[in-house]
Image (cartoon, grey):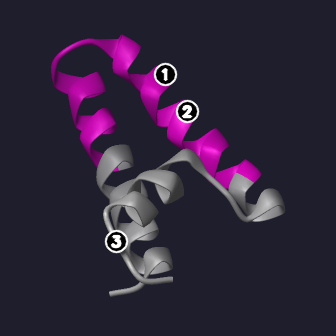
Amino acid sequence: MTLDRYLRMFAGFFVLLSLALGHWVNTNWYYFTAFVGLNLLQSAFTNWCPMMTFLKKLGVRT
């Protein structure tokens, strides 16, 4: 898979996970959902997000 597909997969996973944790564990987890959403929004304009740095270091092809 490519970098973009991994990025979408991790973002979707983090959103679903934080929503579940916010519902069943503590509502403060919704802040993490907002953080992921804001990172996705800014990456639409800058074409960069923090997860891209980690994925590139792991050797994911672009």
Residue extent of the magenta highlight: 16-42
The label nearer to you, 3 versus 2, is 3
- Residue at 31% in and 62% down: 58
According to the picture, the residue beneath numbered tag 1 turns out to be: 31
- Residue at 32% in and 87% down: 1
User: How crowded is the residue under tag 2: few (<14 C-alpha within 10 Å), some, or many (20+)?
Assistant: few
Q: Position of residue 47 (x, y in %)?
A: 73, 65
| Alpha carbon separation for disc pair 3 and 2 | 28 Å
According to the picture, the residue beneath numbered tag 3 turns out to be: 59
In the rendered structure, which disc, 3 or 2, sits on the residue that comes first in sequence?
2
Q: Is residue 55 magenta?
A: no
| Contact check, label 2 and label 1, Cβ < 8 Å | yes
The amino acid sitting under disc 2 is: Ala
Residue 40 versus residue 18 in the image, above or below: below
Q: Position of residue 16 (x, y in %)?
A: 30, 48
The amino acid sitting under disc 3 is: Gly
Mark 2: which secondary structure? helix
Q: Is residue 7 left or right of residue 9?
A: right
Residue 34 numbered tag:
2
Q: Quadrant of residue 39?
A: top right
Please identify the dominant SS of the magenta region.
helix
Residue 58 versus residue 24 in the image, above or below: below
Q: Position of residue 33 (x, y in %)?
A: 46, 35
The amino acid sitting under disc 1 is: Tyr
